[in-house]
Amino acid sequence: MSFSYYSIPSFEYDSNLEIDFSADIKFDTDITLDVYKEVDVDVDINTYVEGNSAFLVADVQAIGKDTFVEVDASVVTIENQLSSITLHAVSIVN
């Protein structure tokens, strides 16, 4: 088996690059955000209670930028002795 041998000729190469680049980039945007949210909750409770009772209704909302709402509730019920609801609420804006 024989192999052909090819000798790559040597050469010299000189390059001088001058590049001028100019760019005018503009980025304009318009963002429109429309949010519509409707919450409709119906609660129907039928109870037949003899003795003591406690009720609590709370509506908690945080709407908009830099808002915070927190509600902590504690409920204790002891049959034929006690019904208690304790509520702690915090509402902060900005």
Image (cartoon, rainbow, N blue to C red):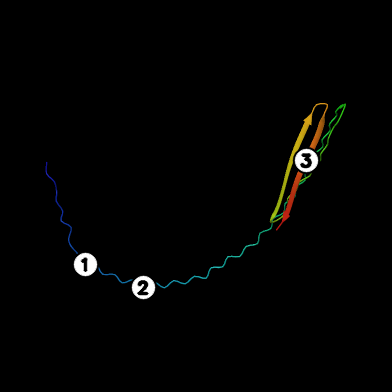
As measured in the structure, the alpha-carbon distance from the residue carrying label 1 to the one carrying label 3 is 90 Å
- Residue 89, label in figure: none
Residue 85 x/y as whole percent: 79, 38
Q: Identify the residue position indicated by label 1 in the image.
A: 12
Q: Earlier in the sequence, mark 2 or mark 1?
A: 1
Going from N to C along the chain, the mark reached first, 1 or 3, is 1
CB atoms of marks 3 and 2 within 8 Å: no
- Quadrant in which residue 21 is drawn: bottom left
Say which residue appears at 74% left-offset and 38% top-offset. 74
> Where does label 3 land, which residue?
86
* Mark 1: few/some/many CA within 10 Å (<14, 14-19, 20+): few
The residue drawn where x is 49% and y is 70% is: 23
Whether residue 39 is visible here, answered yes or no, is yes
Kind of residue indicated by mark 1: Glu
Using the image as rendered, state which of residue 51 and residue 31 is in the foreground: 51
> Which badge, 3 or 2, comes first in the chain's sequence?
2
Q: Position of residue 48 (x, y in %)?
A: 87, 26
- Please give the residue where the numbered disc 2 appears in the rendered image: 18
The secondary structure type at the circle numbered 1 is loop
Q: Is residue 73 left or right of residue 4?
A: right
Q: How far apart, in angstroms, are the residues tagged by discs 2 and 1?
A: 20 Å
Q: Which quarter of the rendered picture does the C terminus lie within?
A: bottom right
Residue appearing at x 74%, y 51% in the figure: 91
Q: Nearer the viewer, residue 60 or 11?
A: 60
Q: Is residue 42 above or below residue 30?
A: above
Tell me how many marks there are. 3
For badge 2, the amino acid type reads Glu
Three-letter amino acid code at disc 3? Thr
Residue 63 at least partly seen: no
Q: Quadrant of residue 93?
A: bottom right
Between label 1 and label 3, give the one nearer the viewer.
3
Give the side of residue 11 with respect to residue 81, left or right.
left
